């Protein structure tokens, strides 16, 4: 059976900017485990091969959702370009956590259009890069999450901010810019990003969140990732109570994919990650916990 899709559904969030979501599933009327994917920094739901990943996971009997964070710089009219750069500058980690919460709440509404197709008590999160940090935090605070997959994930947000003089200059100017290497755009970060992090430092502590997890956690990372060090996968493995580590030989930060991705065939590294993710998602949580739950015991 081919997968069905509904694209670019607009979800109202808590921060006066809509989120745009895609759902991919087999329309067989059977309730399916939910899989929600969160993109990373300077990412978006239609980047590269995320669509192909969604199709493959959905074909295995999952209800797959990917969405744009409300302040990622895209909007419903421009889904793959950062034309809303003010929104990008106003983004922060708490907004992204709220956005993910809004998506979860939306799926679980009694009048959700596809309510017959989902298992509301089986919600799995996948996050790439910065989105990996977001899903770890959300899985620790929301007991409805049953399994967690992080792809090339960060393990710490604090270390990503500038220090001392650069921080002072940022505060003084109120904004600093980062180049989007894909488009050459200068993208702003308003100082509120750091201020919001500082005010919510405890909640945004990935180490603390990972240690609190009570669900199985698959940690996939490429050995040739130059954007996020492989040591960050090691941190998550050390902290998570039931971690399964998937180190992908010679894979970069996006497992050999790029944007746009036009081909049908995926890189072997990414195919391997998808295959292992599906196996993990299909395995009973108790079985995974029994297998990996003791690996961190002293």
Image (cartoon, rainbow, N blue to C red):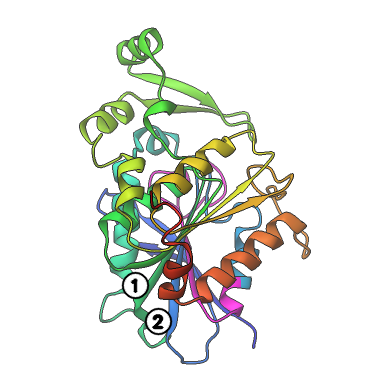
Q: Which residue is mark 2?
A: 118
Specify the segment rendered in magenta: 57-82
Q: Residue at x 27, y 61 (%)?
A: 142
* Residue 11 relative to residue 141: left or right: right
Task: Give the quadrant of the N terminus.
Answer: bottom right
Dot 2: what SS?
strand
- Residue 272 — which label? none
Q: Compared with residue 207, is residue 149 higher up or lower down, i.e. above or below?
A: below
Q: Residue at x 51, y 77 (%)?
A: 62
Q: On the image, which quarter does residue 164 sit in?
A: top left
**Contact? badges 2 and 1 (CB < 8 Å):** yes
Q: Nearer the viewer, residue 283 or 141?
A: 283
Q: On the image, which quarter does residue 246 sit in?
A: bottom right
* Residue 224 relative to residue 97: left or right: right
Dot 1: what SS?
helix
Question: Residue 52 at x, y = what percent?
Answer: 65, 65
Q: Compared with residue 149, is residue 178 higher up or lower down, i.e. above or below?
A: above
Question: Residue 6 at x, y = what percent?
Answer: 51, 73
3D distance between C-alphas at marks 2 and 1: 9 Å
Q: Residue furthest left?
A: 199
Q: On the image, which quarter does residue 267 sit in?
A: bottom right
Q: Magenta region, mostly helix, strand or loop? A: loop
Q: Residue at x 32, y 61 (%)?
A: 214
Question: Residue 224 at x, y = what percent?
Answer: 69, 39
Query: For residue 243: magenta?
Result: no
Q: Which residue is mark 1?
A: 107
């Amino acid at each position: 059976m081919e997968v069905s899709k509904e694209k670019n559904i607009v979800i109202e969030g808590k921060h006066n900017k809509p989120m745009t979501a895609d759902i991919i599933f087999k329309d067989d009327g059977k309730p399916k485990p939910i899989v929600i994917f969160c993109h990373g920094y300077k990412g978006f739901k239609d980047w590269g091969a995320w669509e192909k990943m969604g199709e493959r996971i959905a074909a295995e009997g999952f209800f797959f959702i990917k969405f744009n964070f409300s302040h990622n710089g895209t909007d419903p009219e421009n889904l793959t370009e950062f034309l809303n750069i003010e929104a990008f500058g106003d983004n922060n980690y708490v907004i992204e956590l709220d956005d993910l919460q809004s998506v979860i709440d939306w799926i679980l509404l009694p009048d959700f259009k596809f309510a017959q197709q989902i298992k509301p008590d089986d919600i799995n999160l996948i996050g790439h890069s910065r989105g990996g940090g977001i899903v770890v935090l959300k899985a620790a605070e929301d007991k409805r999450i049953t399994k967690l997959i992080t792809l090339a994930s960060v393990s710490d947000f604090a270390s990503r901010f500038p220090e001392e003089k650069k921080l002072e200059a940022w505060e003084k100017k109120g904004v600093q810019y980062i180049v989007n290497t894909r488009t050459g755009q200068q993208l702003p970060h308003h100082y509120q990003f750091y201020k919001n992090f500082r005010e919510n430092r405890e909640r945004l502590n990935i180490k603390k969140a990972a240690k609190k997890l009570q669900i199985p956690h698959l940690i996939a990372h490429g050995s040739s990732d130059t954007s996020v060090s492989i040591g960050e996968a090691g941190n998550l493995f050390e902290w998570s109570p039931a971690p399964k580590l998937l180190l992908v030989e010679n894979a970069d930060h996006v497992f050999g994919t790029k944007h746009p991705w036009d081909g049908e065939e995926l890189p072997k590294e990414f195919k391997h990650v998808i295959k292992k993710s599906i196996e993990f998602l299909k395995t009973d949580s108790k079985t995974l916990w029994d297998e990996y739950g003791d690996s961190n015991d002293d």
